[in-house]
Amino acid sequence: MDVSGIFPALTTPYGEGGAVAIDYFKANLARYDQTGIAGFVVLGSTGESVLLSSTEAEALLIAAKEAAKPGKRLIAGTGAESTAETIARTKRAASIGFDVALVKTPFYYKPAYKPEVYLRHYRAVADASPIPVLLYSVPIFTGVSLETPDVLELAQHPNIIGIKDSSGVIQRVVEVVGQAPKRFQVLTGGASVVYPALAAGARGAILALGSALPERCVEIFDHFKRGQHAEAQALQQRLALASKTIVSENGIAGVKYAMDLRGYHGGMPRLPLLGLADEKKRQIADVVAQFEPSKATA
């Protein structure tokens, strides 16, 4: 299962009364399908997955399967706090037609979560999963991370095909790529480090910024694959600044507002997350105005 390329971490749009707006969600996918993205990630952190009901989550998975073009890789966020629930969610995503399960680290009982806990958890999920598993380490949200020795242990499992590493630590990419089996694929979760991650051996990226600027995120990947390193480096510098303003400083509300400016259905995040103050909106508008879609990847 090849998961190389750029994947937007899809947002969840809401309509009247705060209900999930499946029509808006499908409209966003139709536009993304016109770019060079490799596929879609549904129910990730940027999708507000922890704020959705199980019914809403399943509706989004079904909608993505219905709306995505053939050939696009579909990755479902299926991680839960319990191993049993993670397995159940993963099996359901597989039955809907998803290609890969993205499984974040459990985090609530942090004092108890030693390396052996994560090894047992992920092996149990991978053993039971009908589809390949991507590890997901996102310490900014969970407060825990999968360290290199744990990743290398888990990389030996035949149904664990890679990791989305959102730490932004390039040394970790170098260590894992250099020591894991060649089939094990590393994807970065940071738009500010796409180029250095690719240079270190990563296969691609799953990006919140990809929901607002998919063309530009694909463009840096294409530059790298063509050996156009000067162009990739220059674009990386611009994307790093954009990611800082849109994603790092303003979170999901920032991503959704940038999407609104680009003509996508972004909208407000779900409470308890809040929208943006006017000054933050102006800052994001200034950043978005600097980026026009590249015709080469549109």
Image (spheres, rainbow, N blue to C red):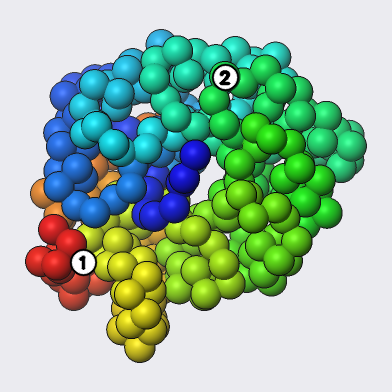
| Image quadrant where one finds the C terminus | bottom left
Q: Is residue 130 visible?
A: yes
Q: Residue furthest front?
A: 182
Residue 183 got which mark? none
Out of 106 and 127, give the one closest to the viewer: 127
Instruction: List x then y, in percent, for residue 6.
Output: 37, 54
Q: In the image, what residue type sits under mark 2?
A: Pro
Q: Is residue 281 visible?
A: no
User: Which residue corresponds to the image point at 65% horizontal and 32% vertical from the top-left?
Assistant: 159
| Circle 2 SS class | loop
Q: Is residue 19 above or below residue 154?
A: above
Q: Which residue is mark 1?
A: 288
| Circle 1 SS class | helix
Out of 180 and 146, give the one closest to the viewer: 180
Q: Which residue is mark 2?
A: 130
Q: Nearer the viewer, mark 1 or mark 2?
A: 2
User: Which residue corresponds to the image point at 39% horizontal and 44% vertical from the top-left?
Assistant: 9
* Label 2: how many Cα within 10 Å (few below 14, some 14–19, many 20+): some
Q: Residue furthest bottom?
A: 230
Marks 1 and 2, the one that precedes in the sequence: 2
Task: Locate residue 278 relative to residue 141 in the image: left or right.
Answer: left
Identify the image quadrant of residue 20: top left
Instruction: List x then y, in percent, for residue 42.
Output: 40, 33
Do the CB atoms of the residues marked 1 and 2 lie less than 8 Å apart?
A: no
Instruction: List x then y, in percent, for residue 225.
Output: 37, 70
Task: Locate residue 289 relative to residue 113 in the image: left or right.
Answer: left
User: Which residue corresponds to the image point at 47% horizontal and 45% vertical from the top-left?
Assistant: 2
* Label 1: how many Cα within 10 Å (few below 14, some 14–19, many 20+): some
